[in-house]
Image (cartoon, helix red, strand yellow):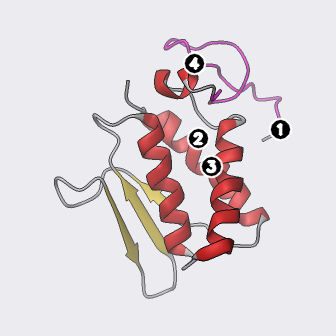
Amino acid sequence: MTMGSLDFSEAARQMGHIVRAEGYRVPTFRSPPRRPGQTRSIRRWPDGSVTVAVALRGRAPMAVLADMIDGVLAANDLAGREAGALRERLWEGVSRGALAGADCAQSGLSLVGSGRPNRRGLARRSHHEAA
């Protein structure tokens, strides 16, 4: 199963909260990358902002999440222990409720909130739940 655009948006939103809370720069996420055949790319803009583009189609949700996390680390020029700590924090955050593709659910991840199921059988965050 592949990750849909709504799940991708939710993952980006949740990662943004974590990255901001940790004091790092939050990149913009988009899909797909501009160059055909690429699974991910990063673009640095003159104003200092960074765009991370990740392909969704035909890819497992875990692969998409891994590319998003790697994009956050690259956007902040992180390496070593600092990168490892943020990577761990991001995986922890998405495993607690970022998205829900079949691959993620089978891996024990519960994604896209914890409310009522939507048309695809994924849990939907109610407007009363705090992010």
Do the numbered discs 3 and 2 sit on residues whose CB atoms are within 8 Å?
yes
How far apart marks 4 and 1 lie (CA) works out to 18 Å
Magenta residues span: 109-130
Which of disc 2 and disc 4 is earlier in sequence?
2
Q: Residue at x 37, y 73 (%)?
A: 43
* Label 2: element kind: helix
Residue on which the image places disc 3: 13
Which of disc 3 and disc 1 is earlier in sequence?
3
Q: Amino acid at mark 4?
A: Leu
How far apart marks 1 and 3 lie (CA) works out to 13 Å
Q: Amino acid at mark 2?
A: Glu
Which of disc 3 and disc 4 is earlier in sequence?
3
Do the numbered discs 4 and 1 sit on residues whose CB atoms are within 8 Å?
no
Q: Nearer the viewer, mark 4 or mark 1?
A: 4
Q: Amino acid at mark 1?
A: Ala
When asked about the image quadrant of residue 58, the answer is top left
Residue on which the image places disc 2: 10
Horizontally, residue 32 falls left or right of residue 119, namely left
Residue furthest front in the image: 80
- Classify 10 Å Cα crowding around label 3: few (below 14), some (14-19), many (20 and above): some
Where's the C terminus, which quadrant?
top right
* Label 3: element kind: helix
When asked about the image quadrant of residue 34, the answer is bottom left
Q: Main secondary structure of the magenta part?
A: loop
Horizontally, residue 59 falls left or right of residue 123, namely left
Is residue 49 shown in magenta? Answer: no
Q: Residue at x 71, y 55 (%)?
A: 89
What numbered label is drawn on residue 122?
4
The location of residue 71, given as percent across then percent down, is: 48, 63
Residue on which the image places disc 1: 130
Horizontally, residue 41 falls left or right of residue 61, namely left
How far apart marks 4 and 2 lie (CA) works out to 12 Å
